[in-house]
């Protein structure tokens, strides 16, 4: 069973002006696709030929982990975005207020964590096993899927995520990220 590149949940230009069609063409159409193609080459003749993507992320190491981790992280990232971003629903809003003091306080922590992630990586809103929410950062292909945390929302802070639209300015990218957040997705993951 080969890994597949899922269809984007929106059109390539749907996230404009915050994220350009060109960024989607490269980030989804080339970077994400390459992780899928590379993983599919690496699993030939291995125990991973018939495992699900989730199981592969949990069990693989080295180069295969890097590629399946990145497939999963990108699948999660595209779903963390929407062209129809609306205010957070009551459940997720209440949880953010309870854990961070307010929605703007959460955004500040998440933005600082994303900007402060050294080099390539990801910032995540996660639910801890005790039910509390936290913001964490992972490097390269590392993902909360291999931990006891439940991911709710993510932002990709690899340079390839923002270089076309914002050059070296990760802060500008983060500013626009908030116009694209799919709070419904975060709320569903919280349930
Ligand atoms: Mn990426």
Image (tube, grey):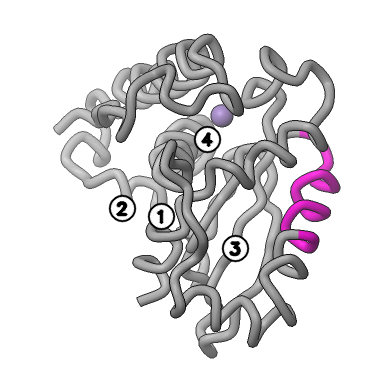
Q: 101 or 164: which is nearer to us? A: 101
**Residue under circle 4?**
66
Q: Crowding at label 1, few (<14), some or many (≥20) Cα neighbours within 10 Å?
A: some
* Residue 15, above or below 140: above
* Quarter of the image where one finds residue 68: top left
Check if mark 3's residue and mark 1's residue have beta carbons within 8 Å: no
**Residue under circle 2?**
55
Residue 10 visible somewhere in the drawing? yes
Please tell me whether the stretch drawn in magenta is mainly helix, strand or loop.
helix
* Residue 93, above or below 88: below
Q: Earlier in the sequence, mark 1 or mark 4?
A: 1
Q: Where is residue 102? Give x, y as percent.
A: 71, 76
Q: Which mark is residue 58?
A: 1
**Is label 3 or label 2 in front?**
3
Check if mark 2's residue and mark 1's residue have beta carbons within 8 Å: yes
Q: Verify whether residue 118 appears in magenta.
A: yes
Quadrant including the N terminus: top left
Ligand 1 within 8 Å, label 3 CB: no
Q: 67 or 32: which is nearer to us? A: 32
Q: Verify whether residue 117 appears in magenta.
A: yes
**Is label 3 or label 1 in front?**
3
Q: Is mark 3 on a helix, strand or loop?
A: strand
Q: Which residue is drawn at 68% across and 17% down?
A: 165
Q: What element carries label 1?
A: helix
Is 48 displayed left or right of 167 in the figure?
left
């Amino acid at each position: 069973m080969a890994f597949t590149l899922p269809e984007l949940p929106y059109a390539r230009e749907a996230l404009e002006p915050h994220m350009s069609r060109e960024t989607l063409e490269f980030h989804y159409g080339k970077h994400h696709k390459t992780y899928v193609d590379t993983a599919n080459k690496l699993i030939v003749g291995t125990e991973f030929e018939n495992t699900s993507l989730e199981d592969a992320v949990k069990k693989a190491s080295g180069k295969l982990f890097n590629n399946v981790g990145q497939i999963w992280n990108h699948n999660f990232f595209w779903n963390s975005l929407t062209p129809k971003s609306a205010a957070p629903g009551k459940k997720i809003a209440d949880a953010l207020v309870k854990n961070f003091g307010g929605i703007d306080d959460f955004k500040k922590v998440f933005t600082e964590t994303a900007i402060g992630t050294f080099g390539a990586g990801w910032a995540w809103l996660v639910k801890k096993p005790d039910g509390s929410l936290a913001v964490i950062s992972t490097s390269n292909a590392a993902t909360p899927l291999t931990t006891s945390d439940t991911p709710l929302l993510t932002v990709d802070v690899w340079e390839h995520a923002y270089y076309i639209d914002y050059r070296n300015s990760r802060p500008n990218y983060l500013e626009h990220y908030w116009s694209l957040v799919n709070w419904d997705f975060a709320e569903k993951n919280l349930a």
